[in-house]
Image (cartoon, rainbow, N blue to C red):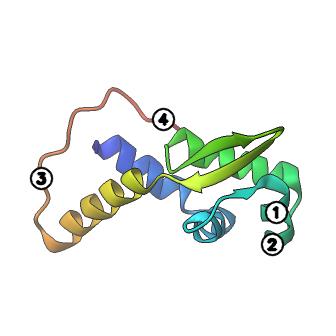
Amino acid sequence: MTEAEVIEIFKALSVTSRVRIIRLIRERQLCVNALAIRLGISPSAVSQHLKVLKKCHLVYAERYGSIMHYRVNNQVMHDFSVAVEDMLTGNQKPWKPSLKSKI
């Protein structure tokens, strides 16, 4: 994971609703309307948050008929947690080069 990718994930997770979305879909997939009901926000607001989370690859969508269901990308979450742990423990490996930020 590049330094820019880690920074973009931190930015994406700096919004409470996005963290709540991650918590809701980490173990089971949900559609936009189900997320909106659970979060108490509009479906369009949920869609905007999901767009940011998808852009940094934290979530992905699967289509079931006409409805998109969202899930956490466990590999990216793992890579992010390893990068953060390495930063916090001083075991930071050299960052991979990155051209520019994604968000």
* Residue pointed to by mark 3: 93
Q: Position of residue 99 (x, y in %)?
A: 33, 26
User: Looking at this view, is 41 or 87 the one in front?
Assistant: 41
Circle nearer the N terminus (1, 3): 1
Residue type at mark 1?
Ala
* Residue pointed to by mark 4: 102
Q: Position of residue 79 (x, y in %)?
A: 31, 54
- Image quarter in which the N terminus is found: top left
Q: Are marks 1 and 2 in contact (CB under 8 Å)?
A: yes
Q: Secondary structure at mark 3?
A: loop
In whole angstroms, how far apart are the C-alphas of marks 4 and 1? Answer: 27 Å
Circle nearer the N terminus (3, 4): 3
- Image quarter of residue 91: bottom left
In whole angstroms, how far apart are the C-alphas of marks 2 and 3? Answer: 39 Å
- Image quarter of residue 24: bottom right
How busy is the neighbourhood of tag 2: few (under 14 within 10 Å), some, or many (20 plus)? few
Q: Which residue is painted at 50% across and 51% down in the image? A: 58
User: Looking at this view, is 54 or 12 the one in front?
Assistant: 54
In whole angstroms, how far apart are the C-alphas of marks 1 and 2? Answer: 6 Å
Q: Secondary structure at mark 4?
A: loop
In whole angstroms, how far apart are the C-alphas of marks 2 and 4? Answer: 28 Å
Circle nearer the N terminus (2, 3): 2
How busy is the neighbourhood of tag 4: few (under 14 within 10 Å), some, or many (20 plus)? few
Q: Which residue is painted at 86% across and 54% down in the image? A: 43
Q: Secondary structure at mark 1?
A: helix
Q: Position of residue 23 (x, y in %)?
A: 59, 71
Residue type at mark 2?
Arg
- Taking 67 as reference, is 86 left or right? left
Residue 38 circle label: 2
Q: Position of residue 3 (x, y in %)?
A: 29, 45
Residue 34 circle label: 1
